[in-house]
Amino acid sequence: MALDPVNRASEPARQFPAGNPLLSRFSPLMLITGGAMRRFGNIPGEAAPLSGTLGRAGSLEVRLARGPREIWRAQRLRYRVFYQEMSAKPDVVSRMFRRDADRFDGACDHLLVIDHAARGRFGGIKPKVVGTYRLMRQSAATRLGGFYTQGEFDLGPMIARHPDQRFLELGRSCVLKPYRTKKTVELLWHGIWAYLRHHRIDAMFGCASFDGTDPDALALPLSFLHHHARSEGDWSAAARPERYVGMDRLPAGMVDAKLALKQMPPLIKGYLRLGARFGTGAVIDRQFGTTDVLVILPVAAIDRRYVEYYGDEGQRYAA
């Protein structure tokens, strides 16, 4: 099961001020942190940082990135998948450093799957980051001025309706092509489940992407999500008005559910199985050549089969 990006960079290329050399402004540290340095130390009322191995399966380990060097490796993987394999168009900075980075990276935790049996260029064992997810808690978003997803979707009313709940944004998910297997995907979700439990998260959200920028070509799967998996009531949210693209391309009676599911990206099908619902309206991301939809998944709505599969305390892939 392949992973597609949930939430990727869509910010315009940065402008270079006169007299400021490119390499001095866009240093490796700036690329790693996106210019937003994390303040070390616990935030009052929050759990201590989650450290150590979160799970293992054979030579694969899932855990959070430990410092700037490993965030750098996650950004390099994202560049390889989003820009080299998929149709994203890098700006001059991303192309120069071969990294996918933005200002949110330094405020997020980065979940990694590492293959400890991977071979380096000269044949020796060299552990490799083969999968990643970016996790942004509500407290970090508040300090930074908002979630990344709020550039595409209006989340304010939904969050305001749940003042006592803790939100987590999922983004920047990708897996190296040879590792797009059930085991890798399950390890990533095992890590996310451990993270949810540790930080007492109540709800998750993020962007999921269809390849292509013509919504009419995606009429069947978009219409299926609109008619059969739309989030309503207290959990409703919509695309920002200036970016809104209608998802109800077809009447409900014309939607062939079986065929629509066949046309869904694997990640969106995975979210549906978990119990996710989707926001109203899509957004076209021309830089990445995608049509984005909003995934909304309260933890209480996760299908009990998956909770039992991973274990209430995440025992399935325990190290």
Image (tube, helix red, strand yellow):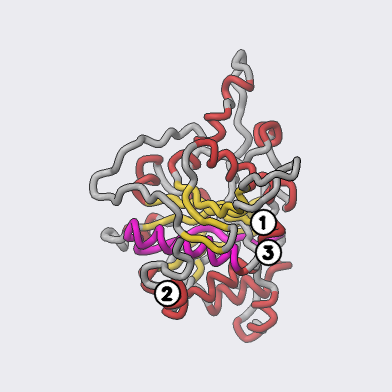
- Relative placement, left or right, of 286 versus 34 is right
Q: What secondary structure is found at the residue carrying circle 1?
A: strand
At 62% across and 86% down in the image, what residue appears? 253
- Relative placement, left or right, of 20 versus 120 is left
How far across and down, in percent of the image, does residue 38 sit? 40, 36
In 3D space, how far apart are the residues under numbered discs 3 and 2 (Cα atoms)? 34 Å
Q: Is residue 311 magenta?
A: no
How far across and down, in percent of the image, does residue 74 sit? 58, 45
236 in relation to 75, above or below = below
- Outermost residue, left side: 45
Answer whether labels 2 and 1 touch (C-beta < 8 Å): no
Quickly name the residue at label 3: 215
Range shown magenta: 183-211
317 in relation to 250, above or below = above
Which quadrant of the figure has residue 297?
bottom left
At 64% across and 47% down in the image, what residue appears? 77
137 in relation to 208, above or below = above
Point out which mark residue 81 bears.
Answer: none
Which label sits in the foreground, 2 or 1?
2
How far across and down, in percent of the image, does residue 150 sit? 47, 51
Q: What secondary structure is found at the residue carrying circle 3?
A: helix
Quickly name the residue at label 1: 290
Quickly name the residue at label 2: 307
* Three-letter code for the amino acid on which mark 3 is drawn: Pro
Which quadrant of the figure has residue 18?
top right
Q: Earlier in the sequence, mark 3 or mark 2?
A: 3
How far across and down, in percent of the image, does residue 14 sit? 60, 31
